[in-house]
Amino acid sequence: MDGSIWPTASLRHDPRGLARACAPSRRTGGGAQRAGSAARGRAPARARVPGAVAPPEPPDFEPHVLRDVPLAHLYPYLNVQMLYGKHLGLRGLVSRLLEDGDPKARELHDTVER
């Protein structure tokens, strides 16, 4: 054997031939048996899974809206490129435009910071 993963040289250039070679035989009603317990007629071993655990109950189902959160607390979580580029329509790399002092980028930045 030449160390290749292909069973024969003729199948190497014919992927459909490989699929036919690996497919279950229609005449015998099945393909080659897997090695191990299935080949000996026993079902394969199954992992033991603990019984179902009930999910924890929430304290309530009421919406909790925080209205007096300073924007400075939220700003680190914002994707500035998405905010300025997609939602506010600024074209280009936002960080570079702000560094270069682009007037439209500056105007949007000042509006958002207000």
Image (cartoon, rainbow, N blue to C red):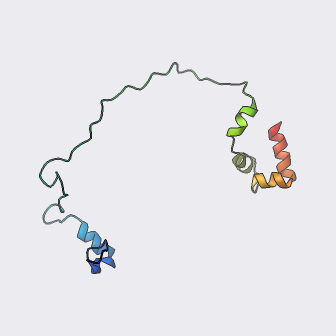
Q: Position of residue 29 (x, y in %)?
A: 15, 61
Q: Where is residue 55 in the image (x, y as percent from the top left)?
A: 41, 26
Total numbered circles: 0
Q: Where is residue 63 in the image (x, y as percent from the top left)?
A: 59, 23
Quarter-of-image position of residue 7: bottom left
Please state which of residues 86 and 50 is positioned toward the viewer in this rendering: 50
Please state which of residues 71 and 45 is positioned toward the viewer in this rendering: 45
Instruction: Give the residue displayed 52% in from the left and 19% down from the top.
Output: 60
| 15 to 83, vertically: above or below | below
Q: Position of residue 24 (x, y in %)?
A: 21, 64
> Which quadrant is the N terminus positioned in?
bottom left
Outermost residue, top side: 59
Left or right of 112? Residue 79 is left
> Which quadrant is the C terminus positioned in?
top right
Quarter-of-image position of residue 20: bottom left
Please state which of residues 108 and 39 is positioned toward the viewer in this rendering: 39
Instruction: Give the residue displayed 13% in from the left and 66% down from the top.
Output: 27
Instruction: Give the residue displayed 56% in from the left and 20% down from the top.
Output: 62
Instruction: Give the residue displayed 19% in from the left and 57% down from the top.
Output: 35
